[in-house]
Every structure is written in structure tokens, then in C-alpha cells.
Amino acid sequence: MNEDTKNWLEAELEDALDEDQEIELEDAVLSQELKKIYQSRHADSMPRKDYFRNLLRLQAELIKLQDWVVANKKKIVVIFEGRDSAGKGGAIKRITQRLNPRVVRVVALPAPSDREKTQWYFQRYIAHLPAGGEIVLLDRSWYNRAGVERVMGFATQQQVQRFFDDVPEFERMLVRNDIHLVKYWFSITDEEQQLRFLVRIHDPMKQWKLSPMDLQSRVRWEDYTKAKEDMLRRTHIPEAPWHIVEANDKKRARLNCMDHLLAQFPYEEVGGPEIKLPERVFNPDYERSTLPDELYVPEKY
């Protein structure tokens, strides 16, 4: 490897690490007073160096898992549930960061339309299930009916009961049809959610994450707790058990979730042909045309 190539590869690696740090900076835009409170609550947070080292190692393993899924036509669904601000989105972002979006898809469905409300409850989720060689990450799932719809009164008691009757058999049916189903519940304390909501209120880059429904979840904390406990008790089945991720520490929660997800599959590194960059075809008669200046994005930076 010549010196120019080595320097270029080092620059590419630095750029990749910069991307990680940009994502981490999402937690940094806080008022000074709020930052003091946050740091005092997370005094034992994992050192950044240790976090990034483990993050990159686990992301490298996730690439191996992805290749194994493609090579063996596996079908995987991973459900991410938890209270608002529990860190589901952050974990999903780190899992997918270096993976192929044609293989790994994130599904975050909006509220059902009027037409969808008349369908079988599970119907709108079926279209998003994976084919062979695909991984689907559900950022919230059919368990909306056991949580927000139940607590906020968007579903009747009869609909909720029907959901609990149906969901175990629905998930068993998925597993019988060779879909690997992994379910995570991200767990945070009352105090941690309050702090994270305050962060969102005071951080203009995060205010979009706060909806009226999120604010109601603070008011109805105990109702959500009862609904969660009932849901876990009634839908924790051998074919598709729940896995609780302690998520007060975001960094540890992400790493623990990624490590646990990898442990669910007997994946192995998939060998492939050696990749060689072909020589560029050079035509001495070709001249690159000059394009009009107005086609170019202004170079302000």
C-alpha cells in the first residue's frame, strides 16, 4: 500500500468516526443548568473512548449478521417498544448506521387511516414483513394497541381483549413460517423520562420529537406502567419472548441491545470472492464537456 492510499484510508476512517460524533452531539445542545443536572444524574456514564470502540466492534459484527441473513435467505423482525424517550430510535440508528438499507429496513408506521381502522388490526403490518434475506426493525409495532391505544382510549376494551387473544397465535404463526421474531422493551425510570423530556423542550433540535401524546404520557405514567406490566405478562411466550433493556444509560443500552441481538442468531462470516477494482477504460478521443455553472451547488463552505 503506497503512502497516498494509506493517507486516504485514514481520512476515510476519520470521516466515519466524525459521523459517530455528529450523532452523539445530538445530546449536547442543552442549557448549562440542564446540562449540570443531566451530568450529575449520569456521572458513571461510559467513557466515550470505550463506547466508540465497542460500538464499532458490534457494528462490524452486525455486518456479518447481515451478510449471513442474505446468504441464507433468513427473515428477521425486531420489535422495539418502550416509553416515549426511552431510546428506541437511538438504538435503531446505531444498529442500521453501517448496514445496507436494501437489506435492513426500519418501519415506523403513522396512526392508522380511516380505511386501515376498518381492517383486521394486524393487516397493515403484514405488508412490511421481511422476505428472505431481509431484516425489518419495527420502531413501535402492533403493541400500540396494548399501550397508547389502550391508555388513551383509542381502542375499546373489547378490541384490547381481542388483541391479547390474537397476538400470541399471530406471533406463533410468524415463527412457524420461519420469521425470527425478537422483541425488546426499553425501560427507563420516571425521573429519567422527565429529564429527557426537559432536554427535548430546551433543545430546538429535539422539540420536533415532542407531541401532545408524549406529554400525556407523563400525566398518565402509572396507567402506562399498568398497561406495560399486563402486556408483558400476557404476551411473553416461548416462541417470542420479551427482552427488557435497561435504558437509563443510553450508551450502555445501545451496546447491550446490539450485543444481545447478535447472540440470538448462529451467524458466521460469509466468505465471498476477492474483490478487485477493474482498470478504468481510457479513450484518448474522449473529452469531458464543460457544464453550465448554474448546475452546480454553490460552494459556501
Image (cartoon, grey):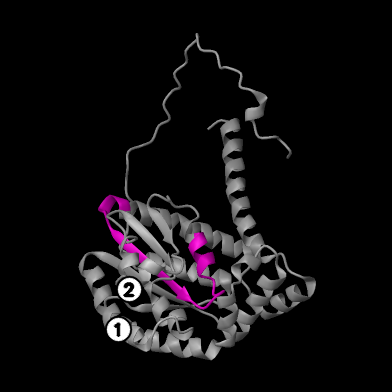
Q: Report the Cα–Cα distance between label 2 and label 1.
A: 10 Å
- Is residue 44 visible in the rendered image? The answer is no
Position of the C terminus by quadrant? top right
Q: Residue at x 33, y 72 (%)?
A: 118
Res 20 quadrant in image: bottom right
Q: Which residues are magenta?
A: 70-94
Q: Dot 2 lies on which element?
A: loop
Q: Where residue 236 sits in the image (x, y, percent)?
A: 33, 82
Q: Which residue is labeled 1 in the image?
A: 162
In this orientation, which residue lies closer to the viewer: 196 or 47?
Answer: 196
Q: Dot 1 lies on which element?
A: helix
Q: Which mark is residue 121?
A: 2
In this orientation, which residue lies closer to the viewer: 197 or 41?
Answer: 197
Q: Judge left or right: residue 256 versus residue 127.
A: right
Q: Judge left or right: residue 150 versus residue 161.
A: right
| Residue 148 counted in the magenta span | no
Marks 2,1: beta carbons within 8 A: yes
Near mark 1 (Cα within 10 A), the count class, few <14, some 14-19 or many ≥20, is: few
Q: Where residue 255 sits in the image (x, y, percent)?
A: 50, 67
Q: Where residue 169 sits in the image (x, y, percent)?
A: 24, 78
Amino acid type, label 1: Arg
Above or below residue 192? Residue 23 is: above
